[in-house]
Amino acid sequence: MAKRSARIAAVPKPDDDDRVKSLESRWKAWDPLDGYRDQAYVRRVKPHSENQKVLMQAIREHCLTLALGPAGTGKTYLAIAMAVEALEEGSVARILLSRPAIEAGENLGYLPGTMEEKLSPYLRPLYDSLADRLGGKRLKSYLADGSIEIAPIAFMRGRTLNNAFIVIDEAQNCTYGQIKMLLTRLGWHSTMVITGDPDQSDLLSGLSGLEGIAGRLQTLDGIAVVRLTDSDVVRHPLVADMLSVL
């Protein structure tokens, strides 16, 4: 027993500096696609509520759909699932996903690395949804050949997106001018879905343009504005309860 205790005591323990260096090295080597299992779900996504059913039908029937609702209602996941479905069926030639690079109430300062490395943390939710529908290997293949493109809002100006399925996520963090610019990117044989929660904007009060854009567009034919509610939340049941009182 004494010998065993002596051996354990002889093993050097890493100090705090070593732990910090280890964490830094792991963070710098982080890849947004690392750790995903190579799996794919061939079954179609099914709606879990009436409003989700309305949203999926609206996306199928309209070139432009705005999905507004609280967190956890499946807005982004359903949009990406239908985008993957369209790509797999050959209805579109590519998928383009975009979201604003804005922190949720924090300022992380300048991030190290290349442009892709700087943007990866902001775009991680999109990678998560894509990997869940495609698996890591197929997702990497689609990203490599350009069939799937993930880009920040800032790089969308001047583009015309033909034969594509476009998903604009977290649109509540876009100004009126930014959303107007994004809407005018829509090209021939394309579908665009804009998702967001007007009540969770990280912009200064009055700067978010999502609600104003939705109010103006809902009167136009060919455009669907679908509003989901707390009853459509598919996360932990407490999420819906909290949203009802917060």
Image (cartoon, rainbow, N blue to C red):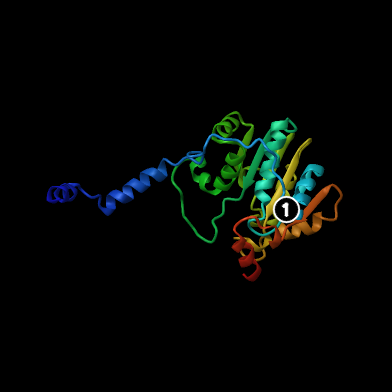
At horizontal 66% and vertical 49% (from top left) the residue drawn is 76
Q: Can residue 74 be seen by looking at this rendering? A: yes
Q: Quadrant of residue 134?
A: top right
Q: Is 59 placed left or right of 219 in the picture?
A: left
Residue 110 vertical position relative to residue 241 in the rendered view, above or below? above
Q: Which image quarter holds the C terminus?
A: bottom right
* Residue 81 percent across, percent down from the top left: 67, 42
Count of marks overlaid on the render = 1
* Residue 69 percent across, percent down from the top left: 70, 58
Q: Can residue 157 be seen by looking at this rendering? A: no
Amino acid, disc 1: Ala
Q: Is 132 placed left or right of 198 in the picture?
A: left
Give 214 or 137, whichever is nearer the viewer.
137
* Residue 55 percent across, percent down from the top left: 76, 50
Q: In which quarter of the image is residue 233?
A: bottom right
At horizontal 54% and vertical 49% (from top left) the residue drawn is 122
Residue assigned mark 1: 67
At horizontal 67% and vertical 65% (from top left) the residue drawn is 206
